[in-house]
């Protein structure tokens, strides 16, 4: 099968373009890594106690990484997922040698450019592509940089971040069907393409190019969602959006809900962090919009309101029924109407 993305070039590009982190001594860096590992373990117990969810499968320990390593891990994960999907789409069709060589290298550079940009902004991630059940990543230089800019208490801010990311790990390890369901929806999105595979692959390439262009050219007005063209794909995207909004909102609810007895300065951190999210230069705002970061920010707020609304009505144990099966996940229209979800999943509560 011809290569759709030159993944090695993507990794090299991300490494070359990624910005250096804040200046810290070797001893300081060592202390940060040890602190994040310790706080991850502390967060795991807090999350389990607060949510009532406990991991049902074993998982690897947290990986504390730098920006280059974060990009490399994500490229490896994307390679695992994208390559078989492209093979399935293309079937026996092989592009010409020139098209393959130039196209894959161009897409590799573009993908690397996007990941280099994101590598300087992501604080943590539960990465599900490269391994089963996934791996928890904390990007140490970004966490240190943000806590410095916010003038936040180091212990409080680091635990706050750990709570969010450990909640994501709990979602995928306490709900063993979640990862398979997510991959199934990604496959359904590909299957829903009614255009020929050649056209679909070209739209994916243009989408990657759009993201890369957004990093360099904030005046670009093309949306990455131009790749979504069929009703079937929109339906799958609605389900994926609802699921991701739930997972992000649940993590936000937990990281703020544990209360000041665990993180004394949580209110101050949240206020300053939200102001930082909303701020930014015109360049930063344009890139965020085209990369879909603004959509993710709305997911945080909408998802947190949904979780709060459900917990307020049926308690945490009642909310946890959302994880019973894919059928109990919220629908897009229910995200702004917790009562509708409660009426569907907890009819006796009415």
Image: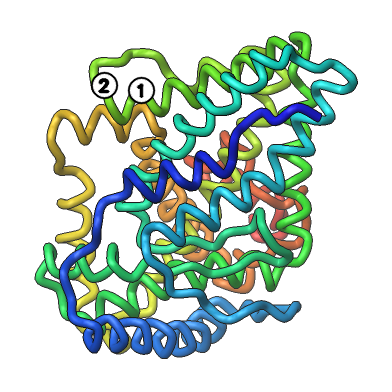
- Picture quarter with the N terminus: top right
Label 2 CA crowd tier, 10 Å (few <14, some 14–19, many 20+): some
Label 1 CA crowd tier, 10 Å (few <14, some 14–19, many 20+): some
Give the answer, above or below, for where 348 lies relative to 198: below
- Left or right position of 65 against 148: right
Q: Position of residue 92 (x, y in %)?
A: 89, 20
* Residue in view at x 40 percent, y 62 percent: 252
Give the answer, above or below, for where 187 lies relative to 248: above
- Left or right position of 138 against 154: right
- Left or right position of 42 against 96: left
Report the residue marked by disc 2: 217
Who is closer to the viewer here, 275 or 197?
197
* Residue in view at x 23 percent, y 70 percent: 144
Task: Identify the image quadrant of residue 260.
Answer: bottom left
Give the answer, above or below, for where 197 lies relative to 319: above
- Picture quarter with the C terminus: bottom right
Who is closer to the viewer here, 211 or 307?
211
Residue 28 image label: none
* Residue in view at x 28 percent, y 26 percent: 216
Q: Position of residue 157 (x, y in %)?
A: 26, 75
Type of colouring: rainbow
Discs 1, 2 touching: Cβ within 8 Å: yes
* Residue in view at x 75 percent, y 14 percent: 95
Q: Position of residue 143 (x, y in %)?
A: 28, 68
Q: Position of residue 108 (x, y in %)?
A: 52, 33
Give the total number of marks visible in the rendering. 2
Task: State the SS at label 1.
Answer: helix
> CA gap, disc 1 to disc 2?
5 Å
Who is closer to the viewer here, 236 or 162?
162
Give the answer, above or below, for where 44 lies relative to 342: below
Report the residue marked by disc 1: 213
């Amino acid at each position: 099968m011809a290569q759709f993305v030159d993944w090695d070039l993507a990794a090299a590009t991300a490494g070359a373009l990624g910005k250096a982190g804040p200046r810290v001594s070797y001893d300081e860096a060592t202390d940060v890594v040890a602190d994040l590992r310790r706080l991850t373990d502390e967060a795991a117990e807090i999350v389990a106690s607060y949510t009532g969810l406990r991991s049902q499968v074993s998982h690897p320990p947290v990986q504390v990484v730098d920006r280059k390593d974060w990009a490399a891990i994500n490229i490896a994960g994307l390679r695992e997922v994208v390559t078989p999907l492209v093979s399935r789409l293309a079937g026996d069709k092989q592009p010409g040698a020139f098209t393959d060589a130039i196209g894959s290298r161009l897409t590799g550079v573009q993908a690397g450019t996007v990941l280099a940009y994101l590598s300087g902004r992501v604080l943590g991630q539960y990465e599900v592509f490269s391994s089963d059940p996934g791996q928890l990543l904390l990007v140490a230089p970004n966490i240190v940089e943000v806590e410095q800019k916010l003038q936040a208490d180091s212990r409080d801010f680091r635990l706050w971040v750990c709570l969010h990311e450990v909640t994501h790990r709990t979602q995928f390890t306490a709900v063993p069907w979640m990862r398979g369901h997510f991959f199934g929806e990604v496959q359904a999105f590909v299957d829903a393409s009614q255009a020929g595979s050649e056209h679909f692959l070209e739209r994916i390439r243009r989408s990657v190019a759009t993201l890369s262009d957004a990093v360099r050219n904030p005046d670009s007005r093309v949306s990455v969602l131009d790749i979504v063209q069929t009703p079937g794909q929109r339906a799958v995207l609605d389900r994926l959006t609802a699921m991701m909004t739930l997972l992000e909102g649940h993590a936000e609810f937990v990281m703020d809900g544990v209360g000041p007895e665990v993180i004394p300065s949580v209110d101050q951190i949240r206020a300053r962090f939200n102001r930082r999210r909303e701020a930014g230069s015109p360049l930063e705002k344009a890139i965020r919009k085209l990369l879909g970061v603004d959509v993710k920010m709305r997911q945080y707020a909408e998802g947190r309101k949904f979780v709060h609304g459900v917990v307020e009505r049926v308690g945490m144990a009642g909310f946890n029924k959302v994880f019973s099966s894919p059928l109990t996940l919220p629908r897009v229209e229910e995200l702004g109407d917790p009562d509708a979800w409660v009426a569907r999943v907890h009819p006796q509560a009415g």
